[in-house]
Amino acid sequence: MMYKNQEGYADPTAGKALANIRREEKARRGYMPLVYICSPFRGDVENNMRNARKYCAFALSRHALPIATHLLFPQFMGTKETPQTREMVSEGEQSEPGVPRTAQSAPQARNAGRLILPHGATQRMALILLTRCNELWCFGDTISEGMKKEISRAHWRNIPVRHFTEDCKEVRT
């Protein structure tokens, strides 16, 4: 929400200053804002996951509670999709109690304890979590297509977006 001065005109400088004061007051009371960590995942996945862990640690050091869906979802979700898994997820049927048919149709995923969902499902779930966050923190100079969607959703939902370098230095925009 845009801060307006006494005359009703938008005053973003005063608005940001007041928001910072509110954030500091909440931090003193033990409040931890929920922060969505936005950083690259694809490409050099191992390095990108290491960076995401570093960004989460940085957020914690700033008294924020980080949510990094690209660290969370790969823990229990597969990455390969077949026509059968797409069809079964859309049907939403279950043949064993508590085990979706998608997991049963992909033995290698089931054996690893992973669920395979249709293309775009993880992005939709990430965007749902994003809408529950107080801020989005974007890290690095590289903005992937997925990151663009997340930033766009944050702007659309009026969620503050903060930009940081890969070294966790804030970039004022």
Image (tube, rainbow, N blue to C red):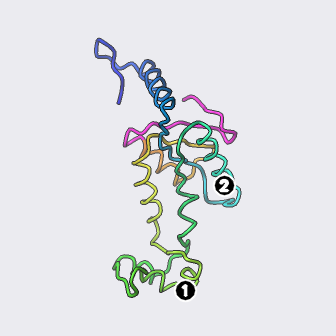
Q: Identify the magenta region.
A: 155-173
Q: According to the image, label 2 marks what residue?
A: 48
**Can you tell which quarter of the image residue 112 is in?**
bottom right
What residue is drawn where x is 44% and y is 65%? 121
Q: How crowded is mark 2: few (under 14 residues within 10 Å), some or many (20 or more)?
A: some
Disc 1 marks a residue whose amino acid type is Pro
Alpha carbon distance from label 2 to label 1: 28 Å
Picture quadrant where residue 164 is located = top right
- Quadrant where the N terminus sits is top left
Reading the image, the residue beneath label 1 is: 107
- Where disc 1 sits, the SS reads helix
Q: Which residue lies furthest to the front in this view?
A: 29
Answer above or below: position of 86 versus 52.
Answer: below
Q: Which residue is drawn at 51% across and 76% down?
A: 81
Position of residue 162 measured from the top left corner of the image (x, y, whole percent): 53, 36
Residue at image point 67% right, 50% down: 51
**Residue 46 image position (x, y, % from top left):** 70, 60
Report the amino acid beneath label 2: Asn
Q: Nearer the viewer, residue 149 or 107?
A: 107
Q: Is residue 86 above or below residue 71?
A: below
The percent coordinates of residue 54 (x first, y second) are 67, 47
Q: Residue at x 52, y 56 (%)?
A: 69
Q: Is residue 59 shown in magenta?
A: no
Observer-nearest of 71 and 157: 71
Mark closest to the chain's N terminus, 2 or 1: 2
Q: In which quarter of the image is residue 111?
A: bottom right
- Direction from residue 163 to residue 121 in the image, left or right: left
